Image (cartoon, rainbow, N blue to C red):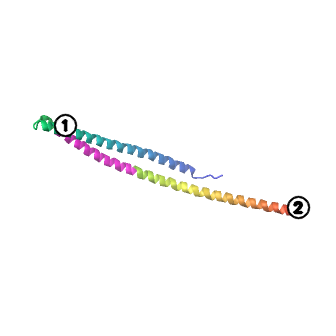
Amino acid sequence: MFRYRLEPLLRYRKSLEDDQQRALAIANRGLYVQINKITELENSRDAAMTWRLKTHEASTHSPHLLLYDKYLDGVNFDIKFHQELRRVTQLNVDLERKKLLDLVKKRRTIELHRDRLKERYSKEQSRKERIENDEMAIMRAGRTEMSHA
């Protein structure tokens, strides 16, 4: 029976990989939150622009125009802030993905080593079995020759 000595290491590498997959999922979730926040702010800005244009058509000296202008400035600032935050979050996602790929490569290396050893073991077992069968066949052939003589 084949027994791989580095199986505990392989299980440890797999657990590290699972932890890294969770970290990548958390980073991706953060990225999607930022993307949704930017979309929400852009929709809010578009709605405020529409209201501002309607107010401007009604009166060019309305005090509401100043209010909408200040609100739009704030929304534009928030959009820029969240875009920068999204960029940083994207870098974090890329870093987590790279770490995961490195862990997968390390685990695959050990698995490949295990598979090669297992194949070598199987070939050796099959060779031993063939030799044993050949020896038994020779012994039988020798016995039958002696009994017929």
Q: Is residue 88 magenta?
A: yes
Q: Is residue 89 magenta?
A: yes
- Local packing at callout 2 (Cα closer than 10 Å; few below 14, some 14-19, many 20+) is few
Furthest residue toward right:
149
Residue 141 versus residue 51: which sits nearer the camera? 51
At label 2, the amino acid type is Ser
Left or right of 135 on screen, residue 58: left
Circle 1/circle 2 CB separation < 8 Å: no
Residue at the image position 88 percent from the left and 61 percent from the top: 147
Instruction: Give the quarter of the image for residue 23.
Output: top left
Name the residue tied to disc 2. Answer: 147
Secondary structure, mark 1, is helix
Secondary structure, mark 2, is helix
Please say if 134 is above or below 3. below
At label 1, the amino acid type is Trp
Residue at the image position 78 percent from the left and 59 percent from the top: 136
Q: Quadrant of the C terminus?
A: bottom right
* Image location (x, y in percent) of residue 97: 41, 50
Q: CA distance from mark 1 to mark 2?
A: 112 Å
* Image location (x, y in percent) of residue 44: 25, 39
Left or right of 77 on screen, residue 17: right
Name the residue tied to disc 1. Answer: 51
Dominant secondary-structure state across the stretch colored magenta: helix
Residue at the image position 15 percent from the left and 35 percent from the top: 64
* Image location (x, y in percent) of residue 12: 52, 48
- Local packing at callout 1 (Cα closer than 10 Å; few below 14, some 14-19, many 20+) is some
The boundaries of the magenta stretch are 69-95
Instruction: Give the quarter of the image for residue 111.
Output: bottom right
* Callout in the foreground (1, 2): 1
Left or right of 97 on screen, residue 85: left
